[in-house]
Image (cartoon, rainbow, N blue to C red):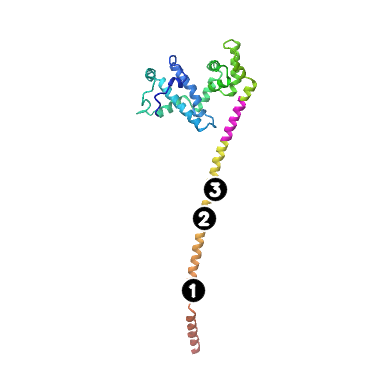
Amino acid sequence: MSPMKTINCYKILALEKDTATITDVKKAYRKLALQFHPDKQPQNATDKEKQNANEAFQNLGIAYAVLSDPKRKERYDRTGSIEEGEFEGDKDWNAYFKELWTGVVTAETIEAQKLKYQGSNEEEEDVIKSYKKFKGNMDKMLQVIECSSPIDGERFEKLIRKAIKEKTVTNLKDFEMTTTAKAHKKRMEAEKKVEAFSKAEKKMEDASDSLMELIKQRSKERHTNMNNIINSIEASAKKTEGKGKKRKQEADSMPTEEEFLKLQQSMFKKSKKN
C-alpha cells in the first residue's frame, strides 16, 4: 500500500488540528468507518461508487494510523505530510490495516454499535451538532449521523423540537420544510424503493447463478449423451464390420462353380463304379 504524501489526515477525519485528541481521532474514525465500510455500501451501488468508498475507507485507516500514534502524529503535525515509504517495508501494512479495520468495524460491530449508540446522549449531541451545521436540513442530517436511516427522521425531529422548546437551538426554516409529514413519507418511500431494488437485484443474481448451473448441467448431460451415441455407433460399426468379415471368410471357403462341377462329376463317377 502506498498512500499519497499529500494526504490530509485531519480533513479526512473531519477534525481540527489544534483541538483534536486521541479520543477524538478514535471517535471520528469509528463514525466514518461505519459510513464507508464495504459492508455498509448499498447492493445497488455502482462499481465507481464502491471503488470510491473503498479508497475513502483505506484513507481513513491511514489517517487513523498516523494520528493515533503520538510519534507519527508529531512528525505529521510538524511536516504536514506522510513520510515516503511510511507504510511500506518490513511490516505487512496491508495486514495491519485489515486487522485495524476488523478490530474496529465489522458487519457484526456495526449492528452492535447501532444498538449502543441510538438513544444515547452521544447521539443526541450529534443530532444537535448536525442540526446547527446543516441549518436544520433533515435530509443532510440523515446522511451523516451515525447509523441513521430515513426511519430515524421523526425521532430526530422530536429531539430537536425538544431542544427548540428548551431554547437550546432556534427554529430554522429548512427544518420545518424537511420535517413535514410529506417529507418524512417521501424519504421512507425512497428507502423502500432502494430496498426493493436491492432485493430484486439479489434475486436476479441468484436466478442468474441458478441458470448458469442449469446450463452447465445440461451441457454436461448433452456431452455425455453425445459420447454415448458415438460409442454406440462405433460399437455397431465394429459389429457390422465383424459380420462382413465372417461372411467374406465363409464365401472364400466355398468352392467355385468350376470346382463344384468337377467335384460333382468325380462323385458321380465313383457312384457308377460302385
For the point 50% across and 64% down, which residue is it? 239
Q: Are marks 3 and 2 in contact (CB under 8 Å)?
A: no
* Residue 213, image x, y percentages: 53, 43
What number is the disc on residue 218? Answer: 3
- Spatial CA span between label 1 and label 3: 49 Å
* Residue 41, image x, y percentages: 52, 29
Q: Quadrant of the N terminus?
A: top left
10 Å crowding of disc 3: few (<14), some (14-19), many (20+) = few
Instruction: State whether residue 109 appears in this view.
Output: no
Majority SS type along the magenta span: helix
- Spatial CA span between label 3 and label 2: 15 Å
* Residue 186, image x, y percentages: 62, 25
Q: Amino acid at mark 3?
A: Arg
Q: Residue furthest left?
A: 90
Q: Which numbered disc flags the more N-terminal residue, 1 or 2?
A: 2
- The count of marks equals 3
Q: Residue furthest top?
A: 167
Q: Which residues are magenta?
A: 187-201
What number is the disc on residue 251? Answer: 1
Give the quarter of the image for residue 9: top left
Q: Amino acid at mark 1?
A: Ala
Quick one: SS at disc 1? helix
Q: Is residue 252 left or right of residue 191?
A: left
